[in-house]
Amino acid sequence: MDDTISRAEHEEFRRRLEAEDGRLNKRLSIVEEDLKNIKELTASVEKLAVNMENMMKIQEKQGKRLETLENRDGEMWRKVVGYVLTAVISVVVGFVFSRIGM
């Protein structure tokens, strides 16, 4: 039974195991903190995505309203031009008929 280890060797082995456990615990704590930060970041990104989606919907509604307003002004302008053109043509036709004698 020469395979037995001395008390000093056993103590050295125990100290090394405890030191390794300490290093592993520290690394585990760091990983847990990083995981917590990643979860917080994920939640923030999710909130940002929801806000961006809501902003996009609002911008689409505003775009439709703006297009409606722009078209309304264009329609009014076309009506005015049509009325003026009708009046000018009526005056010209009336002048021609008065010259002809009708």
Image (cartoon, rainbow, N blue to C red):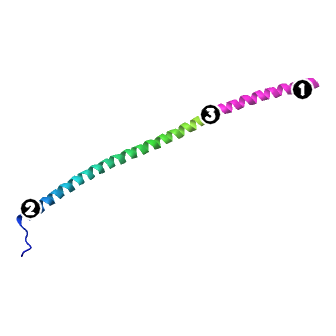
Q: What span is in magenta?
A: 73-101
Residue 32, position as x, y percentages in the image: 26, 51
- Tell which tag, 3 or 2, sits nearer the viewer: 2
Please tell me which residue is depicted at 69% across the width and 30% down the height of the picture: 77
Mark 1 crowdedness (10 Å alpha carbons): few <14, some 14-19, many ≥20: few
Lateral position of residue 56 relative to residue 90, left or right = left
> Is 57 situated above or below 5?
above
Q: Name the quarter where the C terminus is drawn.
A: top right
Disc 1 target residue: 96
Disc 3 target residue: 70
Question: For residue 71, which quarter of the picture?
Answer: top right
For label 1, the SS is helix
Disc 2 target residue: 11
Please tell me which residue is depicted at 7% across the width and 71% down the height of the picture: 4
For label 3, the SS is helix
- Tell which tag, 1 or 3, sits nearer the viewer: 3
Q: Name the chief secondary structure element in magenta.
A: helix
Is residue 79 highlighted in magenta?
A: yes
Please tell me which residue is depicted at 86% across the width and 25% down the height of the picture: 94
Lateral position of residue 33 relative to residue 97, left or right = left
Residue 30, position as x, y percentages in the image: 25, 51
For label 2, the SS is helix
Lateral position of residue 37 relative to residue 24, left or right = right
For marks 3 and 2, the one nearer the N-term is 2
Q: CA distance from mark 1 to mark 2?
A: 125 Å
- Tell which tag, 1 or 2, sits nearer the viewer: 2
For marks 1 and 2, the one nearer the N-term is 2
Residue type beneath disc 2: Glu
Question: For residue 91, which quarter of the picture?
Answer: top right
Residue type beneath disc 3: Glu
